[in-house]
């Protein structure tokens, strides 16, 4: 069994703020992908239901590395920016692969 931990987040932009959301996430991804524990880190735009919604997909080497990510300056900056961009709180799921 792998120690990898996965994080999925659902981010919905306020009307007219999708480009701002994408710009914030692009800057965040560029820095996060440099972190030693980041194995996969990308975003998917929902084209079938709500184009203002972006889903993040993260795979971390282990829970300690994922926890360290929350303390990085680039994530703290992004979270501050997202406060004005998002239409509600992000929905975040974290866990280990079971099947």
Image (cartoon, rainbow, N blue to C red):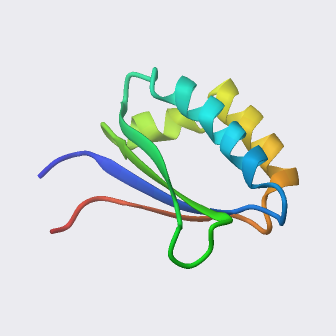
Report the side of 58 relative to 68 (left or right).
left
Residue 71 visible in the picture: no
Where residue 71 appears, as percent x and y from the top left, is 63, 32
Q: Residue at x 45, y 44 (%)?
A: 42
Q: Nearer the viewer, residue 91 or 67?
A: 91
Where residue 3 appears, as percent x and y from the top left, is 23, 45
Q: Nearer the viewer, residue 50 or 58?
A: 50
Furthest-right residue in this view: 84
**Quarter occupied by the C terminus:** bottom left
Q: Residue at x 53, y 67 (%)?
A: 46
Report the side of 80 relative to 28 (left or right).
right
Q: Residue at x 71, y 38 (%)?
A: 24
Where residue 39 appears, as percent x and y from the top left, is 32, 35
Q: How many numbered callouts?
A: 0
Furthest-left residue in this view: 1
Furthest-bottom residue in this view: 49
Image height check: is 58 above or below 10?
A: above
Where residue 61 appears, as percent x and y from the top left, is 30, 36
Image height check: is 98 above or below 66?
A: below
Image height check: is 32 above or below 19?
A: above
Q: Residue at x 42, y 34 (%)?
A: 65
Residue 79 image-quadrant placement: top right
Image height check: is 73 above or below 57?
A: above
Report the side of 9 relative to 36 (left or right).
right
Residue 32 visible in the picture: yes
């Amino acid at each position: 069994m792998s120690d990898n931990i996965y994080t999925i987040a659902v981010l919905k932009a306020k009307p007219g703020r999708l480009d701002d959301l994408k710009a914030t996430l692009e800057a965040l991804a560029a820095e996060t992908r440099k972190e030693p524990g980041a194995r996969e880190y990308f975003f998917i735009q929902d084209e079938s239901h709500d184009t203002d919604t972006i889903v993040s997909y993260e795979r971390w080497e282990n829970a300690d590395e994922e926890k360290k990510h929350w303390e990085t300056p680039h994530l703290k900056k992004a979270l501050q920016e997202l406060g004005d961009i998002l239409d509600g709180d992000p929905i975040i799921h974290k866990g280990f692969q079971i099947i």
